[in-house]
Amino acid sequence: MKAARTHKSEKISRLLPRVSDSVWPAHYLSYFACFDRELYYEAHDVLEELWLGSKNEEPYQFFKGLIQLAGSFVHIQKKRSAPAVRLYEVAWKNLTPYGPKYWGLDMQRLKKTLSPYYQVLTSASGNPLTTLGPPQITHCFCHEQTSKKINPHKDDSTRTIQTG
C-alpha cells in the first residue's frame, strides 16, 4: 500500500518516523505518535495520505474511522462539543467492524481508553481534555507484532466482522 501524494506531503514527511524494519507503514505509526502528542490535526493528516492511497483496499474504512477519531479530538481542542460527538460516533461506526485486533490495534483497548472522553462530552461536563487530560493511545497498538514477519496489508487473521 502506498500513501497518496497531496499538497501537504512535504509537511507530513517531517512527521514520519524514520523506520525501515517495521512492517507497518510510517504514516500509520506516525498517527499514534501524533495523537499521543496532542497533534490531532497532524494525526489526521498523516493517516489521510495512507487512506487516500488505499481507496480500493480493505483497510480504507478502518483508516477513515481513525482519521475521524483524530478529527473529533480536533473539535474537542477547539471546544466544539457537538461536532466532536458526531464525529466520534461516526468514527466508531467505521471502526466497529474491526476487531478484536486489526492492523496491530487492540480495538477493545482503544475504545476503553477513549470512552471516558465521549462520556464527558455527552454529559456536558466540560472539556474532556481538561477534565481527563490528553489520551494516550499508543499503548493500544500491539508493538510486539511489528517484529513478526506478517503482512499488515492482508486481512488480520483475528479480524471479525460484526453484522446486524
Image (cartoon, rainbow, N blue to C red):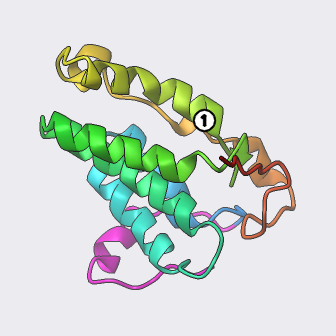
* Secondary structure state at the residue bearing disc 1: helix
Left or right of 151? Residue 35 is left
Q: Which quarter shows the N terminus?
A: bottom right
Image quarter of residue 143: top right
User: Of the residues shown, which amino acid type is indicated by label 1?
Assistant: Cys
Choose between 149 and 41: the one closer to the eye: 41
Q: How many residues crowd around disc 1 within 10 Å: few (fewer than 14), some, or many (20 or more)?
A: some
Image quarter of residue 138: top right
Name the dominant secondary structure of the magenta segment: loop
- The outermost residue toward the front is 164
Image quarter of residue 133: top left
The boundaries of the magenta stretch are: 1-20
Vertical order, 114 against 56 (above or below)? above
Expressed as whole percent of the image width and height from the top left, the position of residue 50 reads 50, 72
Q: Is residue 3 magenta?
A: yes
Expressed as whole percent of the image width and height from the top left, the position of residue 64 reads 46, 61
Vertical order, 113 against 163 (above or below)? above
Residue located at (13% from left, 40% from top): 78
Residue located at (51% from left, 61% from top): 63
The reply to whether residue 15 is in sight is: yes
Residue located at (56% from left, 58% from top): 62
Q: Give the residue at mark 1.
A: 140
Expressed as whole percent of the image width and height from the top left, the position of residue 27 reads 50, 65
Left or right of 80? Residue 12 is right
Vertical order, 45 against 56 (above or below)? above
Choose between 96 and 104: the one closer to the eye: 96
